[in-house]
Amino acid sequence: MAIKRIPLNLTLLNLMMQITTLEGKPTPAFVLNFNNALSNILVAFNGLAEQQADQQDIIEQIILITGLVKDVDGKLTSQSIINSSITPAGVLSSTYDTASMKSNITISAHTRNYTDGTSKPVSGGTLGPFDPGSYFYVYYDDPLRLGGDVSYQTATDPAVSAQTAAGRHSVGGITLATATESGSGDNPGYPGVPRCVDWDSYMPGDFLARESKKGSPLLMLTPDGMDTYIGEVRAVDFVMRPCIRITTTSGATLVVSTDTPITLREGICDVYGSLGKEVPVWINNELGWEIVTELKWLGDRKVAWIDAHNGTYAAGEQAGKYIFTHNKPIQQEQPDIE
């Protein structure tokens, strides 16, 4: 906002003007001249005060807008970290040392890919020694997304290693080598892709999705939708994703990411298209089909990225009541839902 010039009109005193009367009082002409000068000074002063207030408002608006831009940029950066991926997918390996009878973890150099289109090379490293046969999640912190030489760490709780807006980057999980078996690493490579259920979901077999690891059993639906079989988790990771709760006729519920394909009798659809459609369920150890009666938006939730080899597996918010969802990405539309 440009500063306005406010004219200050003052009547100059005339040397020939009589200032006081014979009684020593101000003359009417002097009083009028003096009051006019004061009035003009007050008008100019008030105008400057209003300008200052306007300028302060503008400054505050600029600060607010700058903060909002930074906040939006920060959120985009955070989501880019949360949904980042690595290539190649499998970078974890383990070796057993016969002398110490301990095992080590080796992380190969790889590339970290962010969803904003940027990528950073990340150096490899070694961790250990650890007890053979143990299972660890590997991660590192890099809030500025610099890549290069990072400090790798391990955790036994997937909640600790899950990718976060604060800059935590997951590398995967691995079962350490033993004297008789080589190590087995789990890494989906791209934790931000579809096929996610809420990580607190129950899985048939009495474990939670957050407890899944490579080789964990999955109750799977046959391609014709007529029977079930036992498959296994090929890889798993944990990320934040926007989620929806699906509810069926009997009250079975499942929270899934919005990009999770839903299995129907006639094929698959995106989660938004499942309302009013029949989906496969596993209730009280029996296979059936029920109509989706409600979809509820839940916002961002932590989910388990489970690789079921493009199959259809069961999970649910309640033990004993499960809904099958597909494991293959598809195109989707996103209508408004409550």
Image: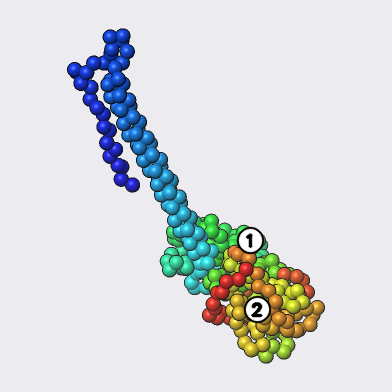
Tell which of 145 and 299 is nearer to you. Answer: 299
Please tell me in which quadrant of the rendered image residue 329 appears.
bottom right
Residue type at tag 1: Ala
Q: Quadrant of the C terminus?
A: bottom right
Inspect this view and state whether residue 85 appears: yes
What's the coloring here? rainbow
Q: Residue at x 74, y 78 (%)?
A: 249
193 or 323, nearer to the observer = 323
Q: Which residue is mark 2?
A: 275
- Where does residue 27 sit, x and y in percent of width and height? 29, 17
Q: Residue at x 35, y 37 (%)?
A: 47
Q: How much space separates mark 2 and mark 1, taking CA atoms?
A: 32 Å
**Whole-percent x and y of residue 83?**
53, 67
Q: How many marks?
A: 2
Circle 1 residue: 159
Query: x, y percentage for residue 331?
Result: 53, 80
